[in-house]
Structures are given as C-alpha cells and as structure tokens.
Amino acid sequence: MDFSFGPYCVCRNRSGRYAIREVLYEHDGRLISYGKHPVAPLAASLADLSQLVEWYRDALDAPAIFLEAVNSIDYS
C-alpha cells in the first residue's frame, strides 16, 4: 500500500484524549475521512502485526488531528 500521509493518525477529541485512528486522504493531501473508533492491533501473522505497529509508530511522529476542527470543515 502507498499512503502519502500514512494510513493512521493520532487524533484528539473534544475531551482532550488521544487515539490512533484510520484516516483517508485525497491525492492533494486533504483529509477525506477518519475512522469513528480508535484502532487496535490485530493481524493474521507476526509480519502483518509488525507492519501495523510500524504504521502506528509513524502516526505518533506526525502532528495530531483535532477532530472538532475536522468535523467543522465544509468540503462542498
């Protein structure tokens, strides 16, 4: 898979709590959507689990997304 910004991102909710969520971006880098629920590592093999953990680690190195700000964007 090729993810310009990674398939996961750290998100902060209105209560100030952080979680890693799946995210989808347009080719130009605009956020399309994010997962409603935080992710948890679950994989069919150790190699797949290792890849998930690497993507989660990458998410920790990127700026957090503030969900309230994202939810207020008008994409029309």
Image: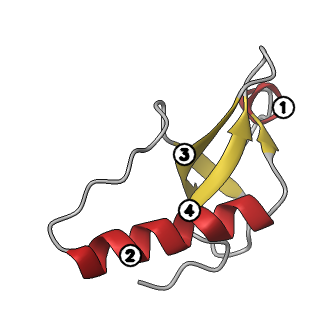
Q: Earlier in the sequence, mark 1 or mark 2?
A: 2
Against 35, is 14 above or below?
above
Report which residue position mark 1 lands on.
69
Q: Dot 1: within a 10 Å radius of its alpha carbon, few (fewer than 14), some, or many (20 or more) residues? A: few
Structural distance between the alpha carbons of marks 2 and 4: 10 Å
What element does badge 1 sit on? Answer: helix
Residue 2: percent from left, percent from top? 49, 85
Contact (CB < 8 A) between labels 1 and 2?
Answer: no
Structural distance between the alpha carbons of marks 3 and 2: 17 Å
Q: Amino acid at mark 2?
A: Ser
Q: Is residue 76 visible?
A: no
Here the colouring is: secondary structure
Q: Judge from the rendering whether residue 37 lies leftward or rightward of residue 64; answer left or right.
A: left
Report which residue position mark 3 lands on.
21
What element does badge 4 sit on? Answer: helix
Q: Earlier in the sequence, mark 3 or mark 4?
A: 3
Contact (CB < 8 A) between labels 1 and 4?
Answer: no
Report which residue position mark 4 lands on.
56
Which tag is nearer the camera, tag 2 or tag 4?
A: 2
**At x 54% / y 45%, what residue is drawn?**
21
Q: Earlier in the sequence, mark 3 or mark 2?
A: 3
Which tag is nearer the camera, tag 3 or tag 4?
A: 4
Residue 56: percent from left, percent from top? 56, 62
Which tag is nearer the camera, tag 3 or tag 1?
A: 3
Q: Amino acid at mark 3?
A: Arg
Contact (CB < 8 A) between labels 3 and 1?
Answer: no
Report which residue position mark 2 lands on.
50
Which residue is more in the foreground, 6 or 18?
18
Structural distance between the alpha carbons of marks 1 and 2: 32 Å
Q: Dot 3: within a 10 Å radius of its alpha carbon, few (fewer than 14), some, or many (20 or more) residues? A: many
